[in-house]
Image: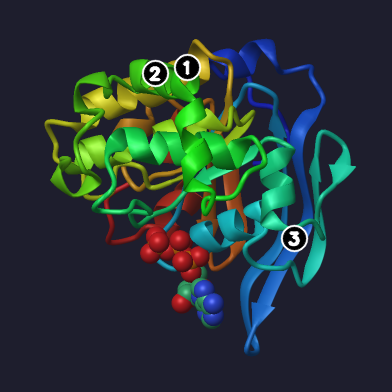
Amino acid sequence: MTPTTAPEGAGGAGTGAAAAAPVLRLTGLAWTVGGATILDDVTLDVREGEFLAFIGPNGAGKTSLFNQISGLNPATAGRIELDGTDITDRAPHARARLGLGRTFQTSSLWPALTVADHLRLAAQAATGGSYRIWRRAGRHTEQVAEALERTGLAHRAATPAASLSHGEKRKLELAVLLVGEPRVMLLDEPMAGVSAEEVPALTDLIRSLHRDEGRTVLMVEHHMDVLLGLADRVAVMHHGTLLALDTPEAVMADPIVQQAYLGEAL
Ligand SMILES: Nc1ncnc2c1ncn2[C@@H]1O[C@H](COP(=O)(O)OP(=O)(O)OP(=O)(O)O)[C@@H](O)[C@H]1O
């Protein structure tokens, strides 16, 4: 398998975007910390409108890669380009302004604040203000209403985050992200902690952000059954390297990938 080669027959928005220049390009990306190599020579192109999933055993480097792309950790070597612009040394907020948005594996919500409060503050931050300028946050009613509508959370607008179900919390994190209208969304295990009953609705929401709104999505997800029918391509991380990059079906059939997962269900 050749990591940067477009697969034949990749579905969804990725097919139409096959000839387009990459929206995100990683070249020789590496991260070494305390003498340990966490990421090693990761090279990868992401096409505009593509849905690219990341899988890999625990500790493979998936979150570390997202931290590099979003700027939380500096790269030890290599280059990150967004729309052809070198963003390797840009701060996280500068990358966010350029259209890179991310969610985290663990919840990033304030328990006592309501759903609508979160969205008002996100709207305030997205327009260049600070989370501290609380009084001005009342101005963003339209953005808040739109984010509530898109994520199906309108009926929960006045509910404190602490009272939401896990699935609703994940939806709120997506709503917060959407307020900033990111072109490229990095979703780190959005299904983590979500009950089996809530997974289909959350999957549908993520699918619509990709297919209906045309957003480029990079998503870490352990379960292949969630990714089938969602991802155009799957990147397999192993020991900080990119082991394979292909359609979900081809990745599942790849003996090298199966070997990496020996003992674990793909
Ligand atoms: N700040 C850090 N300092 C030192 N080691 C780190 C740091 N952050 C991550 N690591 C190590 O890097 C490796 C990769 O971790 P990472 O969280 O990126 O893996 P992952 O593929 O996302 O795992 P999981 O599926 O369990 O979330 C792990 O061995 C982890 O302990």
In the picture of the structure, the residue carrying the numbered disc 1 is 142
- At label 3, the amino acid type is Leu
N-term-proximal mark, 1 vs 3: 3
Residue 67, compared with residue 162, is above or below; it is below
Q: Quadrant of residue 73?
A: bottom right
- At label 1, the amino acid type is Glu
Q: Position of residue 120 (x, y in %)?
A: 44, 35
Residue 126, compared with residue 239, is above or below; it is above
- Structural distance between the alpha carbons of marks 2 and 3: 39 Å
In terms of depth relative to the viewer, which is nearer, 75 or 4? 75
Pointer 3 local density, CA inside 10 Å: few below 14, some 14–19, many at least 20: many
Q: Which mark is residue 112?
A: none
Pointer 1 local density, CA inside 10 Å: few below 14, some 14–19, many at least 20: few
Q: Are marks 1 and 3 in contact (CB under 8 Å)?
A: no
Residue found 79% across the figure and 17% down from its top: 19
Q: Which mark is residue 145?
A: 2
Residue found 87% across the figure and 37% down from its top: 84
Q: Is residue 81 visible?
A: yes
Taking the view exactly as shown, the residue that stands out farthest to the front is: 135
**Element class at badge 3:** strand
Residue found 44% across the figure and 21% down from its top: 141
Q: Position of residue 143 (x, y in %)?
A: 49, 21
In terms of depth relative to the viewer, which is nearer, 94 or 102? 94
Q: Quadrant of residue 159?
A: top left
In the picture of the structure, the residue carrying the numbered disc 3 is 29
